[in-house]
Amino acid sequence: MAKKLCVVGLGYIGLPTAVMFANHGLQVHGVDVNEHAVNLIKNKQLHIEENGLQERLEEAVDKGLFTVSTTPEEADVFIIAVPSPINNDKTANLNYVREATKSIVPYVRKGNLVILESTVPPRTVEDVMLPVLKETGLAFGTELFVSHSPERVIPGKVFEELVNNDRIVGGINEESSRLTVELYKVFVKGNIHVTDATTAEMVKVIENTYRDVNIAFANELAKISEKLGVNAWEAIKLANYHPRVNIHLPGPGVGGHCIAVDPWFLTELQPELAKIISLSRQTNDSMPEYTALKAKSILDAKGIQHGRVAVLGLAFKGNIDDMRESPSTDVLAHLDKLNVDYTAFDPHIKENKIEKQTQDLEEAVTHADLILILTDHNEFKEMLPSAVEDKMRTKAIFDTKNCIQRDAWKKAGFDVVLLGDSKVSTI
Ligand SMILES: NC(=O)c1ccc[n+]([C@@H]2O[C@H](COP(=O)([O-])OP(=O)(O)OC[C@H]3O[C@@H](n4cnc5c(N)ncnc54)[C@H](O)[C@@H]3O)[C@@H](O)[C@H]2O)c1
């Protein structure tokens, strides 16, 4: 049974994981190259938001079970949870995984286990990590054990899902898997399914790819529905009453560092075969431009030449503060290209991350000719026309998430436009 862990990468995944093991009595050393993050954590402060993390971090540090620094230490088990983004050309950037693996080599000893938690293209453990770990001089599978155990948690509910989600463990051999299962059993209550490392990598990537393809289908249905005079949301909702149908929802694009990224891993590995996958990526990537064009056409239809749009929502999904790969950034770029003026507001993005951003809803809607909803934050779901109507120049709202209280907006005399529905609803 492992006594000491070294967790490399203390972000949204690594920090909660490290703290969770420490809360279950293991001695954990956390490592991050970001000195600022390390200093904050040392002082029991957070550089990321996650429900329950603050209390758990305090408990772990106060009990002396969690230390942090910018360099690894010797341990029984090393867990790597560093980023695995894509480059501008949509190829996988495995430099973080490679560098993190290199950084532990001097500390790895006979009998240790190394687990990769980052989401990676299939064969990364075999082709990227093992060649680096070879420098330890240890024999794989007998002296050094290696596995992949991808993380499936959702931000905001990490501690609940770390415990209750089923987990996949893929070792380079049976003993690697067995040791990995034994470790996670410390807190995992879900089932732990064992396979090989490459299959485990594939499993995580196809989970996100499935969701991306399904969303692309919904986005295609939204476009088709607009041509046919059907409300796509209603059609999808009714279709999903079929016991074996589960169509996802359309929107202004797909963001985040998972669903918008991982399908490219398969496209890069097998470009000739990954046809539906790459078409789905293209479909989802086409939605920001589609959204911007539709916003402009709403202004054009009203004869508004130099219209102003109040863009509400910058985060890639509702009720979070994460703008990574957010489609809203692309929507804004397309509005710029179309010479449509805008001011953006997001109550969850507390610092101005883009030029035409305000921290004030009133400022965003003042003299606006259109409200464009890009994120289904609760604040926008609950928003009533009375909060904005006096400030606006034209009463129009374009909802890309089907989240507003449509009847209230219609009653207040707004033109209400819904993505995936060609009808402009007025009272
Ligand atoms: N965040 C999620 O919801 C989520 C869910 C499932 C899987 N994942 C996957 O988990 C992995 C980590 O994601 P994340 O969201 O925690 O990323 P993150 O950016 O929040 O954290 C990664 C941390 O690793 C650090 N780092 C980078 N290189 C390092 C190195 N060589 N040594 C030490 N630290 C290093 C960074 O400074 C950063 O703090 C990614 O592969 C991601 O796809 C994330």
Image (cartoon, rainbow, N blue to C red):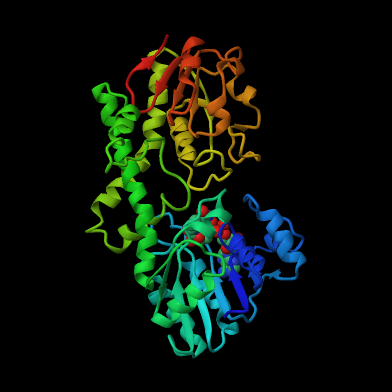
331 over 372 or under it: above or below: below
Residue found 62% across the figure and 51% down from its top: 50
Residue found 27% across the figure and 21% down from its top: 229
Q: Nearer the viewer, residue 425 or 290?
A: 425
For the question of whether residue 123 can be seen, the reply is no
Residue found 56% across the figure and 19% down from its top: 384
Q: Nearer the viewer, residue 272 or 125?
A: 125
* Residue 79 locus on image (x, y percent): 55, 71
| Quadrant in which ligand 1 is drawn | bottom right
Would you identify the image quadrant in which residue 416 lies? top left
Query: Image check: 370 left or right of 16?
Result: left
* Residue 253 locus on image (x, y percent): 41, 39
- Viewport quadrant of the C terminus: top left
299 over 242 or under it: above or below: above
113 over 345 or under it: above or below: below
* Residue 303 locus on image (x, y percent): 41, 12
Query: Image check: 256 left or right of 269?
Result: right
197 over 388 or under it: above or below: below
Would you identify the image quadrant in which residue 244 lies? top left
Q: How many marks?
A: 0
Q: Nearer the viewer, residue 243 or 116?
A: 243
Residue found 47% across the figure and 73% down from its top: 181
- Viewport quadrant of the N terminus: bottom right
For the question of whether residue 149 can be seen, the reply is yes
* Residue 88 locus on image (x, y percent): 43, 54
Q: Nearer the viewer, residue 419 or 185?
A: 185
